Image (tube, coloured by chain):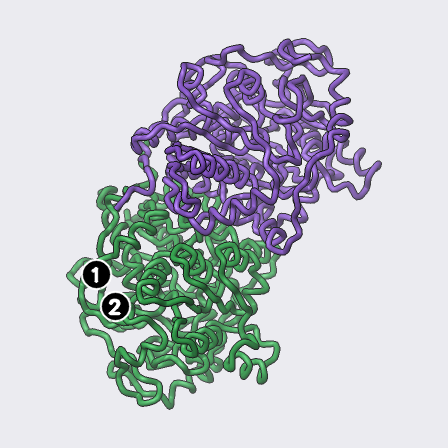
Chain colours: A purple, B green
Amino acid sequence: MRTKKYVLTEKDMPRQWYNIMADMPNGMEPPLHPGTGQPCGPQDLEPIFPMNLIEQEVSTQRWIDIPEEVLDKLAIWRPSPLFRAYGLEKALGTPARIYYKNEGVSPAGSHKPNTAIAQAYYNKVAGTKRITTETGAGQWGSSLAMCCAFFGIECKVFMVKISYNQKPYRRLMMETWGAKCTASPSNETAAGRSILEKTPDSPGSLGMAISEAVEVAVSDKDTKYALGSVLNHVMIHQSIIGLEAQKQMQMAGDYPDVIIGSAGGGSNFAGLAMPFARDKIEGKQIDIIAVEPTSCPTLTRGPFAYDFGDTVQMTPLLPMHSLGHNFVPAPIHAGGLRYHGMAPIVSQLVLDGIIRPMAVHQMETFNAGVTFARSEGYISAPECNHAVAATIREALKAKEEGKEKVILFNWSGHGLVDLGAYENFFRGKLSDHELPQSEIDAALKDLESLPKPRQAKK
Amino acid sequence: MRTKKYVLTEKDMPRQWYNIMADMPNGMEPPLHPGTGQPCGPQDLEPIFPMNLIEQEVSTQRWIDIPEEVLDKLAIWRPSPLFRAYGLEKALGTPARIYYKNEGVSPAGSHKPNTAIAQAYYNKVAGTKRITTETGAGQWGSSLAMCCAFFGIECKVFMVKISYNQKPYRRLMMETWGAKCTASPSNETAAGRSILEKTPDSPGSLGMAISEAVEVAVSDKDTKYALGSVLNHVMIHQSIIGLEAQKQMQMAGDYPDVIIGSAGGGSNFAGLAMPFARDKIEGKQIDIIAVEPTSCPTLTRGPFAYDFGDTVQMTPLLPMHSLGHNFVPAPIHAGGLRYHGMAPIVSQLVLDGIIRPMAVHQMETFNAGVTFARSEGYISAPECNHAVAATIREALKAKEEGKEKVILFNWSGHGLVDLGAYENFFRGKLSDHELPQSEIDAALKDLESLPKPRQAKK
C-alpha cells in the first residue's frame, strides 16, 4: 500500500513558532501612527491589543515559545495531515508529485483557529474579558468564537451584513460556540450609526465592520480587538503549518520545488510558506506562489505603499501592497480574499523577490475545486480553490515540460459551509471579473496623500 | 503536555474487517423471500446487489480481507483519531474518562464513506455501471456519491423529500461529486408515483426512497442498489472503526466500561461496538448502549419481528426490531435516525442481551451538542448528538456515584451541514416528541400478517 498521508503525533508538534522577521533580507518598514505619520510605539496599540501580543507584533526573535495552554488546545486539530494527492495527479496525468497540507481538519474547518487560539489565550492571560472582531465569510469569526469559548472569554463579532444574510451557517457556528454576532453596519456603534444614516441599506464591508469592532474595544478597558490575518503576530502563529509540513515532506523523502497558497490577508499562505521562504533566503531554489483573485489583485496590480487597514482610517498605516482603503472588491464568493491590502510580511517578501504573486479567475477556481473534489474527495472553500487552481496550472506545466516537479500547497479549509457558492457555479450564475485599470487607478488615488515607504517604487 | 488524541498511521490500519456473525451466541435468523416466505438464496438478491457483496452478506467468516484498492482510498480519511474529551470532562466535572472516535474527518464528514468505498469498489469489480440509493439527511448519499466518483461509477440518489428541501447543502455535496439527486417520492418510478397518488404532499421517508432506488436497480442489468446501513455487509465494513479504537484505547492504556453510539439503521454504532461486543461475548464486562430518538424508538418499543426494509415491500424480510414498514417518524431533524427498522445484527445482539438500547429526547440531544461544541470544539451532527447526550448521562451518573468510569463513544460525524437544525433549536422551534402507544400499536399491525422469527417474543 502506497503512503497517502504523512501523520505526525502530538509529540512531533512544533513547540516554537517561527518568526521570519528575524531573517528577512531587507527587514520590515514600521507601521506609522495615523495621526503623526511617525512609527507606532507599543503604547499606540495598547487600547486595541493586549501588550503580550503587541510584543509579538514587533518581535524580531526567530523562535517564539508556544505556551503549554495553547499547545494543549492546538492538539484538538493539530498536527494536521500532509497528503500526497495521488488522485489529482492521476486525473491530470501529470508527472508532478503533488502534496497538500490539510488545514480543514479543525472544528471550524480552516486554518484560522491556529491564531484564534493563541490570541484568545494571550488575551485571557492579560485579563481581557471580551474580544471584538469583524468577519466576512465567517471563517475567522467562527474560529475566534470557538477559541473564546475554550477560555471563557465573551466574543462579539461584527459580520458584514451581506454575508450575515447570505451565510447563515457560519453565523450559526458562532452562536453554537456562544458568540454574539451582529450584522454590520449596526446601530450598536457610533461608526455603524453614522454609516446607516448616510446609507440605510448598506450591505456592509470588512472596513466598516473593523471600525465597529475597534470602536467597541477602545471604549471599554476590559475589551480588546482581534484580527484574523494581515498582522505580524498572526503570521507567526500560522507558521506552525509550514513547520509541520517541513517534517512531513522529510517523511515523504521529498522537498518542494513549488509552494502554493491562496492569499487574501496572507495568513494561510504565509503560514505554510514562511519556513520554506527561510530555506530560500538561505539559498534553496523554490518557486513560492501567492494566489489571489483577479477581482481583488492586491499583489499583482497594487503598489507597495503605506495604507490603512480599514475604510474609516482608524488603524495604523501598514507598509503593504494595497489597492487603497476604499477599494470595494466585486462580490465574488471567496469572501476571505476580498481585502484591499495584504500582510506586510507577505508584501515585503514579494518586494524582495522571495514570493511570486499570481492572480486567477473565478471560473478557473471553481472548476479546479470540482476536479479536486472528484479525485481527492475533499470539497474546498472557495478561497482555497485559488490554491488548487494554481496547483493544477503548475502540474499541467510540469506535464507539458515532462518534469517530475514537486508541488506543495496549503489546503486551507473545506467548503461545506460555502456550498451556496458551488450552487451558483453549477447553475451558471458565476462569471469571471477582470478589473478595468481605470477602477484601480481611481482606488489608488486614496494612497497619494499618505506617507510613502522607503522601498516604494517610483 | 497531556495526550489529547491517539493517532494511528496508515501502517496501523486494520487489513481485515471483523464479522461478528462468526461469534454471535445465538446466531442470526435468515432473511426471507418476500413472496415465498422461505429463506433467501443468494440468487434472490442478485438483481439488487453484486454477487461479491451478497457473499459478504451471508458470510460467517470471522475476518475478511480488505482489498488493497479499498485500503488505498480509506487512507484518505483513515485511521481516524481517537480523542480524550478533557474539555467535556471538565465541563461536566465528572471523574469519568471520556474518549471519542472522530469519524467526522472524512471528506463527507461522517463514518458513511467506510462502507461506501467498499461497496463502490465491489460494484466496480462486478462491472456495475450505475448505483442507485436512498438517503435521509444526506450523509449516506453524499458518501456514496464521492466513492462512485473515485471509481468512475454513475450515482443516482433518491433523497427523502423533507430533507431534500431542508438540507440543500448535502444535495450540493452530491452534485459536486457528480451524482444525480432526486427528491423522493418522485415521478421517476412506479413506486414513487403510487405514493404520490395517495399522498401528493408526502414528506417522504427512507422506506419510500428505498423502494424507488430498488425499483430502478432491478429494472436495468448494469445498475445495482446500495444501502448505507442495516445490512450485514455494511456492519462488517464499519467494523474498522472499532478495530482501530481497540488499538487506540490500548495506546491510551484504558479499556471502556461503557460504549455508546447513536443508532438509526445501526451502522456507526455497530462499527464501533462490534469488536468490543466480541470481548463481551468472551466474558468482558462492558455496557454497550445503542441510542435512538424517542420519536423513532425502534429498539426500545418495537418488537423483534420479520419486516420489510422498505415501504413498498420489495426487499427481503429481515429479522429485526421494527416499528412496521409503514411507520413514518415525526420530522425531527436527525434524519439519519428516522428509520422504521434496525440492523438485524444489532437487533439480534439486543435480543441476546449484549447491547442495551436507550431512547433520548430531542431537546436533550441538542443541549448535549452545544455543551460538546463549547468544550471540545467539534459541532456534531444531530444524529451524533444522541450519542453525546447518552455519554453526558453516563458521565454524570459516574459523578454521582463517584466512579472513575471509562466511556467511549462514536462521534459519527460533524453537523456543519445541519446547522439549520441548530438554528431551530436556538430559536425555540424544537420540542420533544413522545410517541403515543396507540400510534405504535397501529403501525405494528402491519407486522401481523408476516412470518415470525423463531426467537420472537410472544
Residue nearest the observer in this picture, A6 or B422: A6
Task: Tell me residue A206's x, y (percent).
Answer: 67, 34
Residue B64 image label: 1
Task: Tell me residue B84's x, y (percent).
Answer: 34, 43
State which tag comes first along the sequence, 1 or 2. Answer: 2
Q: Are marks 1 and 2 on the same chain?
A: yes
- Residue at 39% across, 65% down: B228
Residue nearest the observer in this picture, B405 or B379: B379
Tell me: A167 left or right of B411: right
Asked whether the residues under the numbered discs 1 and 2 touch, taking CB atoms below 8 Å apart as contact, a structural biologist would say yes
* Residue B172 vertical position relative to residue A376 in the rendered view, above or below: below
The chain containing the residue under callout 1 comes to B
Q: Is residue A284 visible?
A: yes
| Three-letter amino acid code of the residue under disc 2 | Gln
Label 2 neighbour load within 10 Å: few <14, some 14-19, many 20+: some
Label 1 neighbour load within 10 Å: few <14, some 14-19, many 20+: some
Residue nearest the observer in this picture, A342 or B358: A342
The chain containing the residue under callout 2 comes to B
Q: Is residue A152 visible?
A: no
Residue B318 image label: none
Task: Tell me residue B165's x, y (percent).
Answer: 59, 64
Residue furthest left as drawn: B282
Quarter assignment of residue B344: bottom left
How many labels sit on residues? 2
Tell me: A172 left or right of B451: right
Residue B56 image label: 2
